[in-house]
Image (cartoon, helix red, strand yellow):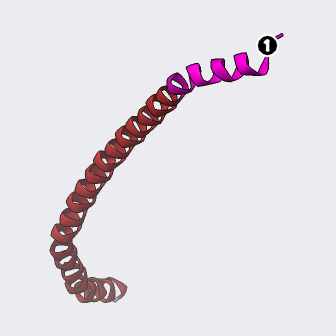
Amino acid sequence: MFQFTQVSKFYYMLKPVYSRMVRYICSLRVKGATLRLKGATLRLKAAMSRLKDATLRIKGAVPRLKGATSRIKGAVPRLKGATSRIKC
């Protein structure tokens, strides 16, 4: 069985080792969190570039869609005329 003085001596011997160990573990946690943050930032940048590409594709598709709509609108009267001629 330890005497109180022996226990306190043992504690004071281990205290610097324990504090260094705690600091080391904390630094590892910070490093891990930093790496996870970097990874998340890179994924976010990639997603933003994909979004930008998709937006540009949509912007390019709008005039083509308008042209197709106008061609359909132009074809409707011709279709009506053709159906009326067929009915006669």
Whether the magenta-drawn stretch holds residue 4 is answered as yes
43 or 87, which is in the foreground?
43
At label 1, which amino acid type do we have?
Answer: Phe
Residue to which mark 1 is pinned = 2
Q: Is residue 64 above or below residue 34?
A: below
Q: In this view, does 50 lie above or below 26?
A: below
Q: Which residue lies furthest to the front in this view?
A: 5
Q: Which residue is drawn at 32% across and 82% down?
A: 86
Q: In this view, does 43 lie above or below 24?
A: below
13 or 47, which is in the foreground?
13
Q: Residue at x 22, y 85 (%)?
A: 78
Q: Is mark 1 on a helix, strand or loop?
A: loop
x, y percentage for residue 31? 38, 36
Whether the magenta-drawn stretch holds residue 63 is answered as no
x, y percentage for residue 40? 36, 47
Query: In this image, 12 relative to 83: left or right?
Result: right
Q: For residue 38, what is the image quadrant?
A: top left
Secondary structure predominantly adopted by residues drawn in magenta: helix
Q: Which residue is drawn at 44% across and 29% down?
A: 24
55 or 44, which is in the foreground?
44
Query: In this image, 75 relative to 88: left or right?
Result: left
Segment colored magenta: 1-18
Q: Residue at x 20, y 79 (%)?
A: 66
Task: Give the position of the C terminus as an image quadrant.
Answer: bottom left
Task: Give the position of the N terminus as an image quadrant.
Answer: top right
